[in-house]
Image (cartoon, grey):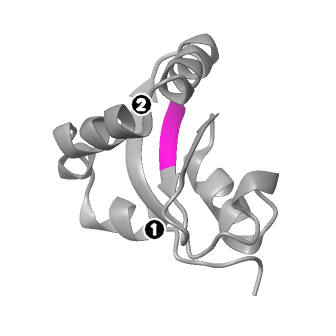
């Protein structure tokens, strides 16, 4: 499985990324070892998650979303009920609430 995701940072900005291991990637963000952009911008909150079949698809989707305006990204987040497709156990494991490795 490959994932394209968006995080909302503590300053209100949005970060978009992709990974083939969402739990590991979110843990890296949570500990401050994720993307340079998200360091110092905690707390972080997972606001969008898309499951794709291939790495190529996930990377292309990430690039497409990054080109969207903030308004378009917020509309995408609102339109998509990605959380409905996950169990409560998965939701709890995917929560990103850490700051910068504190």
Point 54% across, 72% down: residue: 10
Mark 1: which secondary structure? loop
The magenta span reads 1-6
> Where 100 sits versus 96, above or below?
below
Q: Residue 51 carries which label?
A: 2
Depth check, front residue: 68 or 93: 68
Place of residue 88 in the rendered image (x, y in percent of width and height, measured from the top left): 26, 66
Magenta span includes 2: yes
CA–CA distance in space, label 1 to label 2: 16 Å
Residue 33: x and y, percent? 82, 62
Q: Which residue is drawn at 74% across and 76% down?
A: 100
On the question of residue 1 being in view, the answer is: no
How far from the left and from the top, in percent, is residue 94?
A: 46, 61
Q: Where is residue 9 in the image (x, y as percent from the top left)?
A: 55, 64
24 relative to 87 in the view: left or right: right
Q: Is 80 a magenta residue?
A: no
Residue 11 quadrant: bottom right
Q: Mark 1 points at which residue?
A: 95
Q: Majority secondary structure of the magenta segment?
A: strand
């Amino acid at each position: 499985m490959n994932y394209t995701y968006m995080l909302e940072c503590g300053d209100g900005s949005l970060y978009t990324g992709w990974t083939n291991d969402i739990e590991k990637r979110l843990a890296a963000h949570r500990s401050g070892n994720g993307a340079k952009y998200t360091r110092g911008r905690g707390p972080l909150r997972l606001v969008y998650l898309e499951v794709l079949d291939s790495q190529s698809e996930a990377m292309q989707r990430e690039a497409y979303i990054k080109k969207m305006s903030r308004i378009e990204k917020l509309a995408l987040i609102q339109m998509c009920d990605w959380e409905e497709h996950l169990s409560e156990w998965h939701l709890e494991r995917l929560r990103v609430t850490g700051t910068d490795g504190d």
